[in-house]
Image (cartoon, grey):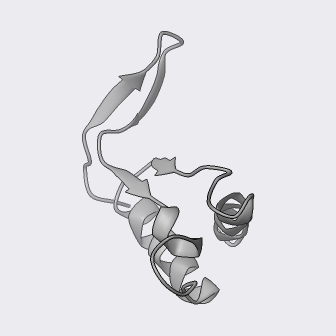
Amino acid sequence: MGVNVPRIKLGSQGLEVSKQGLDCMGMSASYGQRKPEDEMIQFIHHAINSGVTFLDTSDAYGPHTNEILIGKALKRG
């Protein structure tokens, strides 16, 4: 599967995420024109396949645009 990315506890509930996260802000807002959706989905897949499990997003990037993009990427596998 993916590269062995170190993990870290998130909060006190026992959840763990990758120490390295993927900042999704530039995928749909803030840095010039919106990026092509298919390319961003491929990028998300690459991050996940590399062991990244922490996808950093916010309602401020759209709103909801990032969450919809990530949902599409996860739905596609």
Residue 73 pos. (x, y %): 64, 69
Q: Which quadrant: the C terminus? A: bottom right
Residue at 41% x, 57% y: name it.
22
Q: Quadrant of residue 72?
A: bottom right
Against 3, residue 29 (above or below) is below
Against 55, residue 2 (above or below) is below
Residue found farthest to the top: 12
Residue 7 pos. (x, y %): 31, 35
Residue at 47% x, 70% y: name it.
26
Q: How many discs mark residues in the rendered view?
A: 0
Residue at 62% x, 84% y: name it.
37
Residue 62 pos. (x, y %): 69, 64
Against 66, residue 20 (above or below) is above
Comparing 4 with 10, the one in front is 10
Against 34, residue 55 (above or below) is above
Residue at 73% x, 59% y: name it.
63
Q: Which quadrant: the N terminus? A: bottom left
